[in-house]
Amino acid sequence: MKLLWECLWAYGACVAFCFLFNIRGRTLIFSSLGGLLGWLTFSLSFPLHNDIMQYFAATVLTAAYSESMARIVKKPATEFQIVALLPLVPGGGIFYTMEYCVIGNNSMFISTGLHTLGIAGALAMGVLLVSTVVRLIHIVRTHREW
């Protein structure tokens, strides 16, 4: 039941950001479903025993979903990715990193900062991996038709 509520909250947050980014219509629904899918993947991939790998797995699935929905709906993939990755952004990690910096707790500042950078790197690498694979598939299909 807790997982259901978490996914619904992720969906609701994504809907709110769709309004902020002026995304309307069915793109709003599909973008927000990407956020729900990403959070569900993150929550169900706990056997990886490493939250950075959980973030990476969720990002790969979310980016693949965004790329496929971009082809189906004929909209830019970033319109789906920006909203769908929103529940995975390590906002709490950034907050606590800055808090430890301000209060002068250097060991926790470095530890939390490196962990937050690891999560951000996992998000970036997941999007990069999927975008590269999609681009390579497109290049192979284009050259095969010659």
Image (tube, rainbow, N blue to C red):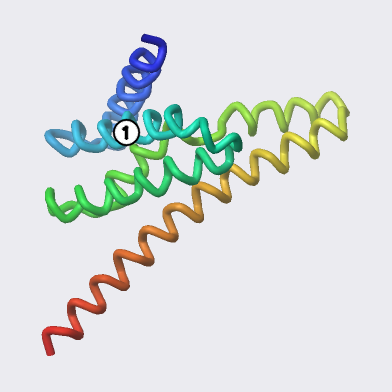
User: Which quadrant of the figure contains the N terminus?
Assistant: top left
Residue furthest to the bottom in view is 146
Q: Amino acid at mark 1?
A: Leu
What residue is shown with label 1?
Answer: 37
Seen at 45% across and 52% down, the residue is 126
Q: Residue at x 20, y 85 (%)?
A: 143
In the image, residue 135 sits, relative to residue 10, either above or below, namely: below
Question: Which quadrant of the figure contains the C terminus?
Answer: bottom left
Query: Which element carries disc 1, helix, strand or loop?
Result: helix
Q: State the image coordinates of residue 122 (x, y, percent, origin top left).
A: 54, 48
- Above or below: residue 98 compared with residue 127: above
Q: How many marks?
A: 1
**Residue 8 occupies quadrant:** top left
Based on the displayed image, in which of its 4 quarters is residue 30 positioned? top left
Q: Position of residue 46 (x, y in %)?
A: 51, 30
The residue at 52%/33% (across/down) is: 47
Quick check: 40 left or right of 107?
A: left
* Residue closer to the observer: 79 or 52: 52
Circle 1: is it few (<14), some (14-19), or many (20+) Cα within 10 Å?
A: many
Q: Residue at x 27, y 46 (%)?
A: 65
Q: x, y percentage for residue 92?
A: 60, 26
